[in-house]
Amino acid sequence: MGFNRLDSAAYLASQMAKGFARSLQQRAAGLGFSPGQFPILIELWSEDGLTQKQLLERVDIEQATMANTLSRMERDGLVERRPHPSDKRAQLVFLTGKASAMQTEAVEAAMAADKELFRGFRTFERELLLEYIRRILENAKHL
């Protein structure tokens, strides 16, 4: 029996994530951020001045990916790192004025990308799919 990718939740979820990233990329490029930076921006808009470790816990990506993403964000003028006042090994990550100023437009871009992916869905279908996705993600935490 062969593998049918269209019957694979993992394959379809991967394709869905790529579709969202493409849709967000088109909208985000003009604002000055990338889809991979968006989860970090969301966390810092919610609570500025987090450590890299706190961001790792909240965003759930690999350490190396976080370090590279923060370096690019720093290069692009979105974040700045400052020494932690009591932990010499840690740095705090703060948004720049540029990143703070783009919050409303960036969130609107993400919502527009999300809306585009759900085009043709009825409200209850969207809510049901989101509930299923949340359940799958919860199950994935225990793997």
Image (cartoon, helix red, strand yellow):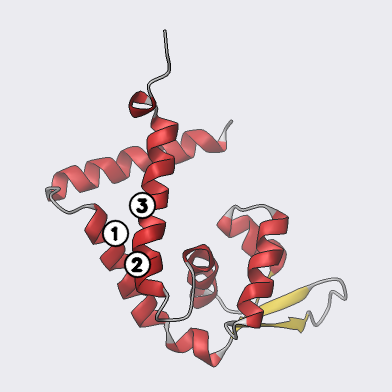
Q: Of tags 1 and 3, which is closer to the observer?
A: 3
Amino acid carrying mark 2 in the image: Ala
**Residue at the location (59% across, 82% down)?**
76
Q: Position of residue 114 (x, y in %)?
A: 29, 59
Residue 20 location (% of width, % of height): 36, 55
Element class at badge 3 = helix
* Residue occupied by mark 1: 114
Q: Is residue 65 above or below residue 32?
A: above
Q: Residue furthest front?
A: 2
Residue 110 numbered tag: 2
Q: Secondary structure at mark 2?
A: helix
Q: Amino acid at mark 1?
A: Asp
Q: Is the N terminus in the top left, top right, bottom left or bottom right quadrant?
A: top left
Label 1: few (<14), some or many (≥20) within 10 Å? some
Q: Nearer the viewer, residue 25 or 96?
A: 25
Q: Residue furthest right?
A: 88
Residue at 57%, 58% (x, y): give it.
59
Nearest the camera: 86 or 109?
A: 109
Position of 80 compared to 59: left or right? right
x then y, percent, for residue 23: 34, 61
Q: How would you rate the neighbour count of disc 2 (Cα within 10 Å): few for under 14, some for 14-19, many for 20 or more? A: many
> Marks 2 and 1: CB-CB under 8 Å?
yes
The span from disc 2 to disc 3 (Cα, nearest Å) is 12 Å
Task: Write down the quadrant of residue 125 in the picture.
Answer: top left
Name which residue type carries label 3. Answer: Gly
Please give the name of the residue rendered at 80% of the width and 72% of the height, measured from the top-left corner: 90
Tell me which corner region of the image, top left, top right, bottom left or bottom right, holds residue 67: bottom right
Residue wearing tag 3: 19
Tags 1 and 3 touching, CB below 8 Å: no
First of labels 2, 3 by sequence position: 3
Report the quarter where the C terminus lies: top right
**Residue 98 in the image: above or below residue 121:** below
